[in-house]
Amino acid sequence: MTPQTATLPPPLLSVEDLHVHFVTSRGVVRAVEGVSYEIRPGEVLAIVGESGCGKSVSSLAVMRLLAKPAGRVVHGRIMFEGVNLLDLSDEEMRERRGRDISMIFQEPMTSLNPVLPIGLQIKEPLFIHLKMTEEQAQARAVELLKMVGITDPERRLDQYPHQFSGGMRQRVMIAIGLACNPKLIIADEPTTALDVTIQAQILELMKELSRKLNIALIVITHNLGVVARYADRVNVMYAARVVEQGTADQVFLAPRHPYAMGLMRSVPRLDQPRGLKLETIEGLPPNLLDPPKGCRFAARCAFKADICAQDPPLVEIEAGHFSACLRAPELAAGTLAPAPQARVDAGARVAKDAPPLLDVQGLKKFFTVTRKGGLFSNTTSQVRAVNDVSFKIAPGETLGLVGESGCGKTTIGRLVLRLENPTEGAIKFKGEDIAAKSLNELRDIRRKIQVIFQDPYSSLNPRMTIGQIIAEPLMVYKIVPNAKAAAERVAELLVQVGLFAYMAERYPHEMSGGQRQRVGIARALAMEPEFIVCDEPVSALDVSIQGQIINLLENLQHKLNLTYLFIAHDLAVVRHISDRVVVMYLGRLMEMADGDALYAEPLHPYTKALLDAAPVPDPSVERARAPRALKGETPSPLNPPSGCVFHTRCPLADGDCKNIVPEPREVKPGHFVACIKV
Amino acid sequence: MLGYLANRTLLMIPTLVGVAILIFFMLRVVPGDIVEVKLRGDGGSVTQETIEKERARLGLDQPMIVQFGQWMTGLATLNLGNSMWTDRPVVEEISLRLELTLQVALMATVIAILIAIPLGTLSALFKDTWIDYTIRIVTIAGLAVPSFWLGMIIILGLLYLFNWLPPITYTPFYVDPVANISQLIWPALAVGYRYSAVVARMVRSSIVEVMKEDYIRTARAKGVYEKLVVSRHAMRNAMLPAITVIGLEFAFLIGGLVVTEQVFNLNGLGRLFVQAISRNDFTLIQSIVMLIAVVFIVTNLVVDLLYAWLDPRIRYGSK
């Protein structure tokens, strides 16, 4: 032990050489191999890594909540306050769960019991662990709800989970986690399912509470921005092992493992302008049923050498900074450095003066919702999903459409595809109004407008081969004369999206998420479209795969002169790919501007709030930013606020904002803002 | 709540009218004539005139639409008419049998629930252990064994072991509860075994599903006792699909117990139904069908109310 660490308090939890196996029908999956880490009271430790790297499994093992009987700890110790949790009986472990160690899960929508009032769910651990009476528990539950920022707690305790929004449910989960004043909270992707402004609220809350109550906090996440903003220490995991460990500054500013370096460089960043090509980590993580010998990352590593055939130990390369790379000293010395990021030639390809390819004018889409009353007393109300939105897209351009859930961005995509009929307004594609066409006339236009969907898992028919899926539109539209020509075209398309021709014989379940998304892109390209609606095309993918798909989309755009409508909630991804960006809130267009201008100088208060809420994966940048989480939640689109829909959460709002519906005004050339205060 | 009930009760009317139209016209499309069966069935020679007279007396010579109108008027005023075969009021014919059938069905349901819920739960909690396998063999057997065969085995067993036979005449519950129960418990067991097998399998699969839910993991992470995890967090959610099956099976038992009634020599609704069909006794058939329809609808309503009671998402009328 170095003298420096001797002054620190003893660790609250120390995981030592943990190995977890899952027995499956196809063999033993070594989900966690030799993971060790420590956490001290009041510390925030982040565990980052991509899906399947073992980050969740290692923390479920700490709780001893691995799925039985498949998952078991085969080796290692989990020391919590000097006791090895693995030696405890089930009953002794149960006593510690919820009292000493709490866990907050990823999915607030499914993690609360739908048939029990949330009051009972909060009080349950109080009754069990602290033997409180009903009155004491009630008082404590009210106190907890106040602490996590839920107003009117007495009334809300009697309500059921479905009466809460996602963000509110996650607050309830945190209240449950805090109930017995635990010493350690493990939060497994606590904000992944939430919108960015709500994510900021929840994370600020957790960080503040852990500071105030001196609780140790383990945050498991794939979002590097969250890590940079909140973590003291970071564990980077890859293929069941910890590959790098250190303080946030060490890992972010001077990563010493090629995987960690690649991860940092493959994330699109809010504070980087368009034009830089995303660095990617090519290839896929190894299969943990049969992991390769030696360094697990070698197959994808740019610095691979003969030495990498040996198993790399996790060694300390500077005080408190560990790396599992045999070439870490060379990386530290700077003799090994990644190639500088390539630039793509942005801007030149957009024909700004040409007539717009897509011209959306005054688009409205209202859904009628019927609420069942008695036999004759049904009431109807309208959801204004899209309300008076206008924008143009030039040929060769990418227009990014961002906003939080329920803002209407996906509905716009569906309207452009004519999967929905607009209530009002025009959608002109090459001057022809799509909204006014009959289904027959649409056939020709549909060839030119294609779509890439969000979920590569459910949008491919599981009973068709990849070849059949891609060939289907070719045959339907008689683009190719016969089956042989179709097969040739399929092979060509697969190669074009970075797959191999032989993959046409495979079924979707035989491919990874990233590969499936490539298939989705190939299917869209089969029609030789001019315009593609990309509806959250990368949000279901891991960071390193995300970069690959974004680069592919950009390359295809250059080669085939495509125009994109890129719909996403991730501001950094949108910034990276878009020429111009539209920000939406509750069905209305808030701001529209050139991408770099919008991010450099947002004018609308909502855009500012969004950008403030989204964390940047760089601790030095994050520390310089003031935490300014937007208050409150998005109102229901069934009953949107009068006047400016944002006025209920807006820091600039005054009386006028309640009455005046702001029209988008051109404040600067090409920069439109719908706000009367700007 | 009351509004909902009133609403659902009103909605019964179109359903029942639909059933009435279907059964009325279907019966009259099928060949066969009660007067022929009644008067000439045993080879007796009767003049055509007598036949016509009998037809006129029963109203069968009227145009079909008029007959339908008369029947619907009867239904609306709760006057079901007389059996065409025995001339006794239909209400009288049905009520005694319904009482018996309803009692057997209720007892079978209670037996089924008492067996199925513990067995299904154990089976789910000890999934893929010998406990689970044993219970699954028992329930598969329950599905495979016909209840009339089980009934015969029960009767033979009672005779062989205790030299006791169930009485031939039916004793209503309010006359002698002990005699009544000791008579009806056996058919209820024979039917309840199969019933419990269906429900137990549903309980097992829904508990297996529910135990995988995130909120079960949350409950465990809170340090909730395992017993409480099952009884408070899992059971209530798992009961929802089981209730549907219980309701459907119950409705089926009214009128579906023909063979079992035969084996236990019970004069139940199922037997009456078969008799009425073989005699082409239109008024009786129609009334029994309407009764079964009402039972189905009411059972479904009860199931829906139980759902609302168990599941606040339904109770508060959101998605």
Image (cartoon, coloured by chain):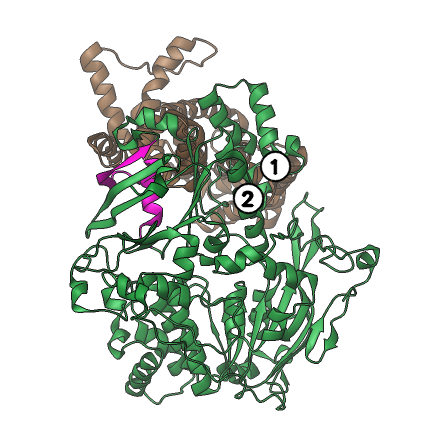
Chain colours: A green, B brown
Q: Which residue is mark 1?
A: B75
Q: Which residues are magenta?
A: A52-80
Q: Nearer the viewer, residue A510 or A655?
A: A655
Tag 1 secondary structure? helix
Q: Which mark is residue B182?
A: none
Direction from residue A147 to residue B173 in the image, left or right:
left
Q: Amino acid at mark 2?
A: Ala
Q: Are marks 2 and 1 on the same chain?
A: yes
Direction from residue A287 to residue A332 in the image, left or right:
right
- B28, above or below A437, in the image: above
Direction from residue A676 to residue A391 in the image, left or right:
left
Residue at the image position 23 percent from the left and 65 percent from the top: A298
Quadrant in the picture for residue B80: top right
Q: Amino acid at mark 1?
A: Leu
Tag 2–tag 1 contact (CB < 8 Å)? yes
Upstream in sequence: badge 2 or badge 1 = 2
Tag 2 secondary structure? helix
- A596, above or below A48, in the image: below
Residue B246 covered by magenta stretch: no
Residue A65 covered by magenta stretch: yes
Quadrant in the picture for residue A59: top left
Residue A475 x, y percent position in the rendering:
38, 82
Q: Is residue A222 visible?
A: yes
Q: Nearer the viewer, residue A316 or A469?
A: A316
